[in-house]
Amino acid sequence: MIEPPFQSTAAIETLRQRAAILRSIRGFFDDAGFFEVQTPTLSSETMVDLHIDPVTVAREALQLSLPHAHSDLYLQSSPEFAMKRLLACGADAIYQICPAFRAGERGTNHNPEFTMLEWYRMGDRFEEGIQLLSQLVDRVTDRPACQQMTYQAAFEAFAQFDPLTATLPQLRADSSRLGIDLTGLDFEHVDDWLNLIFDHAVVPNLGRGQPTILTHYPSSQAALALICRDDPRTAERFELFIDGIELANGYGELLDAEELLRRCDENNRARMEMGKPGLPMPRQLYRAMQHGISTCSGCALGVDRFVAVLLGKRELSETLTFPIDRA
């Protein structure tokens, strides 16, 4: 039987269960001394990421005179920049559950509009950030306690090589050895090959039977995480996986304002090499970091995916009221 197009793709009982999960999440953060915030969904700045494309809104569409120099505004792909600005304003432990948007993302585990849970706590280092994520999983799920595994150890276990020393020729050979279809592929950068192997050979094995927090990503994949002092080849970045699905991404947070601009500029150059438009530099966050943000850790979790995994749903749409094709 074909469903009428007005109907929710999530069953009403699923939406009740989703609401219970959200109550549990809020209860966890409230009990831990966090307070909930709301930051703009529409902003003049956006995350400058090689692989994430924002949804743009022409400034003229608002029919307002605005001071922003850039012609576009952006639906936020994450509340990260605004929440970090709040840390500079004196917030100490904050969380947010909000809509986020990413262009071109539609599929089994994607929708261009999705729900993001994001949090930051001052004083937390890398290790405390991992511990807090583990505690959240313990509180909200009935899964066993999280295990930790480094990025390097995961590749050695599931792809049988060391990703921190691999060369381009070796990565091409390992991709073929692992049975990955390489038709039309000829990457020039190590990280492109690592991401390919990671997605095909490593991720499907993570979090099977026990939630896994993967740590110490290569420094070239640091995003806005600190570089590890004890091994500069790696970064203070961690991710949560359950049942072979990536659910959360966290950092021991970068605090250097000049390094922020350097990394964003590097991402913009890489974007333009790929034929993508450059994105505005995060001047507001830069000023906030110049003002001062002390040691902290933050993490973002995809709520829709999290709910889908916890409830045993095969597709993200089973947790959403009206995905993009019914919105």
Image (cartoon, rainbow, N blue to C red):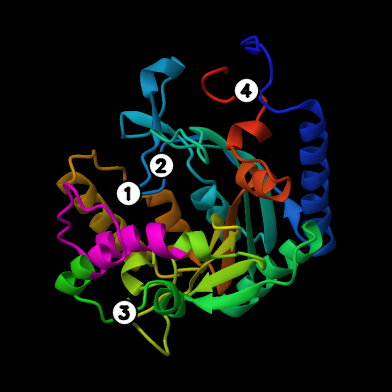
C-alpha separation, residue under disc 2 versus residue under disc 3:
33 Å
Cα separation, mark 2 vs mark 4, equals 28 Å
First in sequence: mark 1 vs mark 3: 3
The residue singled out by tag 4 in the image is 322
Is 35 magenta? The answer is no
Q: CA distance from mark 4 to mark 1?
A: 33 Å
Residue 176 sits inside the magenta stretch: yes
Q: Amino acid at mark 1?
A: Met
Query: In front here: 258 or 17?
Result: 17
Residue 46 point in image, percent of width and height: 41, 43
Marks 1 and 2 close (CB-CB < 8 Å): yes
* Corner quadrant of residue 59: top left
Measure how far apart labels 1 and 3 are at the Cα level.
Answer: 30 Å
Residue for badge 2: 45
Q: Which residues are magenta?
A: 174-202
In-image side of 263 versus 24 (left or right): left
Q: CA distance from mark 3 to mark 4?
A: 42 Å
